Image: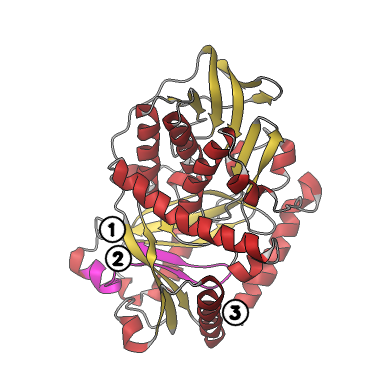
Amino acid sequence: MPANEPADSYYAATANPAPRRAPLTGMTDCDVCVVGAGITGCSAALNLAERGYRVVLLEAQRVGHGGSGRSGGQMIHGYARDMPEVERLVSADDARRLWQLSQEALETTVSRIRRHDIRCNLRFGHLSAAIKPRQREELSRFQAYMEARYGHEGMEMLTGAALRAQIDSSRYIAALRDHRSGHLHPLNYTLGLAEAAAAAGARVCEHSRAVAITTGGTCVVQTPGGAVRSRFLVLTGGAYMNELVPELRRKIMPVGTYITATEPLGEDRARALLPGNAAVTDTNFVLDYFRRTADHRLLFGGRVSYSTYQPLRLAAALRRRMLQVFPQLAGVQQAYTWGGFVDITINRFPHFGRLAPNAYFAHGFSGHGIALTGQAGKLLAEVIAGQAERFDLFAKVRHRDFPGGKLMRMPLLVLAMTWFRLRDLL
């Protein structure tokens, strides 16, 4: 079974009821055609429909089929790169604006969930956990930097008994807690956004893969069963766009990321593992992340693949990593193991821009997208409505092609990641 077609996703098994939406047939006209019904696309469709635009949202499979419905579900402030690194990409003033937009992204996510009553098990609290003294010092410096430069005083360093009160594991020596970040059921969140977009007037078409696009005065998106003509075009397919737009494909790489979920542990046992119910991410480059679910399982992610092929003996590999953190789960069975693709950029910063004056894209969230993708949909609606300033904060960041061309860029990426894996061991 290919990595992007798992039969045993925990999220699919616990998804809220959702209608099956008819594929596109024939020719249709609209104001905006959005390609890709993940969080970015559904958020864009919702924001645009609320502004009164006639929107058609095309999805190659079903809503949330891609990375949006398969992720760890961690809703975290900031970007895949820490702010000191973001400052190397933009001016100091723009970095502050980008930080504020990442904070607004959390607010946007929460307000959408509450406004539309999306049942996605939203919980607050996130821990960035250190395994080694070097990582603890990095977290301490990061906390001081963010407080001094950005006035972000909502983080708390935990060690000793305070840490063990949050994570029942001896693997970690410190953790930086953020109360505004959190976690949710990502597929149910995406399904809720799609339902809200449809209720606002957007037409959502599943099993309607975009096979060709043209831009100009009128944009045209062709699918196997029809075509959409629109005044504006929005591309949000990310790693799942394949070669639809080659010049964009060269800027991103699909990276497989994988998760396992245990059998139900019971409320007391699950609570004992993570008493504060925070999501946890360690600070390795090739990281582990985990959290409790609403039905009292442990959800644990910790493998990646840069080859687009699912690793061999995936469930066993994830189990080994899980038991390094929680050896007390040695007798617990794994009920689900699945994966999907995230799209990464070379600089690990989101890639926004224009293919034409009326054709926009947003992708490259690099595994840090639960909040930012919803914000991206909001900014896409703003730029189509003529308010480009906030979208262009992202669009002005320069992005390079992955080196090596179509044949060699994947092997070169694997070599680069090997160096980072070795650094994690130091």
Residues at marks 2 and 3, CA–CA distance in whole angstroms: 28 Å
Q: Bounds of the magenta span?
A: 269-293
Locate residue 12, reporting x and y percent: 36, 42
Nearer-N-terminus badge (1/3) = 1
Residue at label 3? 425
State if disc 3 and disc 2 touch (CB < 8 Å): no
| Eye-nearest disc, 1 or 3 | 3
The image shows residue 225, relative to residue 286, as above or below, that is: above
- Residue located 31% across and 48% down the image: 120
| Eye-nearest disc, 2 or 3 | 3
State if disc 2 and disc 1 touch (CB < 8 Å): yes
Nearer-N-terminus badge (2/3) = 2
Residue 332 badge? 2
Q: Magenta span has 144?
A: no
Residue at label 1? 263
Nearer-N-terminus badge (1/2) = 1
- Residue located 45% across and 31% down the image: 51
Q: Camera-side residue: 7 or 350? A: 350
> How dense is the environment of label 1, judged by Cα within 10 Å: few (below 14), some, or many (20 and up)?
some
